Amino acid sequence: MIRCQGLRSGYHGRPVLQGIDLEVAAGEMVGILGPNGAGKTTLLLTLSGVLSPGSGTVRLDGTDVAAMADRERARKVAAVPQRGESARELTVRSLVLMGRYPYLSFLGGYGPGDEAAAAAAMEAVGVADLAPRRLGELSGGEFQRVLTARALAQESDVLLLDEASASLDVARKIELYQLLAARNAAGTTILAALHDINLAALFCRRLVFLKGGRIEADGPTAAVFTQPTLSRIYETDIIVIPHPTTGLPQALAVPGPGPAPGPGPGCTGHGPGRSRQ
């Protein structure tokens, strides 16, 4: 489905990716993890064709992404950016309908099928009630969900998500990734860049860790989501324990040496080792 060979990419002559070899099979759900500046966003932008490689190739179903026409590429790949730019006066419904761009004829407008696809995407993401609202009236989390709805309305084979859950509360994060898991089960190939490594471990069957523009670890979640790997990549002590319900691995950061935090608002201060006077 997706194949990168010797991929180097960056911005204005500044290299970020340092020679990426990566293959993603159709139907996989892959988490892209790593510290700040590791190259996660750059990788997704290059896979989507927004950013051209400095060298190396990105192929989608055997075709070089750079050689694809815009509409052809958009039928294959949909993306949810980390930071979306939009006209604040545009309505939610109008933005989501833009996901149907790849299917419009040269002079055609949106038809009933496009309207239905947009409505279904908004309903799936939980923003149907926001359809008439203007984008400038939305919170950051609401806007991020609208961008996700636009990508779902595109009905592409591959879905690339760059921190799509970053502005969402805990419940909305779980809802979003349950929706993505269902889409993946129906055949959509998904690559998601996340800083929330525990969320990735709960929903992604394969994890790819980037650091310094290179792949540092790649494999099934249970094999690579380990204490040595996480501690090395994030350069801090991390322990891994099984989730009490699912049994899937979850990470806990270990605080380093330093003064113990004092009691915050609402705390009694009578924790372990403290006596009541």
Image: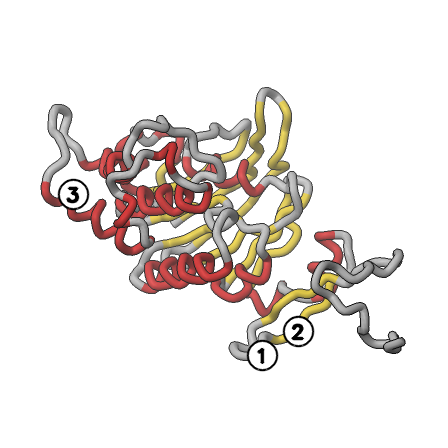
Q: CA distance from mark 1 to mark 2?
A: 9 Å
State the residue position of label 1: 244
Q: Amino acid at mark 1?
A: Pro
Q: Amino acid at mark 3?
A: Glu
What SS does tag 1 mark? loop
Tag 3 near tag 1, CB within 8 Å: no
Q: Identify the residue at image location x=81%, y=73%.
A: 270
State the residue position of label 2: 241
Q: Identify the residue at image location x=53%, y=59%.
A: 200
For label 1, the crowd category at 10 Å Cα-Cα, with few meaning under 14, some 14 to 19 and many 20 or more, is few
Q: Is residue 125 left or right of residue 139?
A: left
Question: Relative to residue 122, is residue 11 depicted above or below?
Answer: above
Taking depth in this image into account, of 266 and 93 the one nearest to the observer is 266
**Furthest residue in direction front, as rendered:** 277
Residue 276 in picture, x, y percent from top left: 86, 77
What SS does tag 3 mark? helix
Residue 163, can we see it?
Answer: yes
Q: CA distance from mark 2 to mark 3?
A: 45 Å
Taking depth in this image into account, of 224 and 183 the one nearest to the observer is 183
Quadrant the C terminus occupies: bottom right
Taking depth in this image into account, of 222 and 174 the one nearest to the observer is 174
Residue 255 in picture, x, y percent from top left: 79, 60
What SS does tag 2 mark? strand
For label 3, the crowd category at 10 Å Cα-Cα, with few meaning under 14, some 14 to 19 and many 20 or more, is some
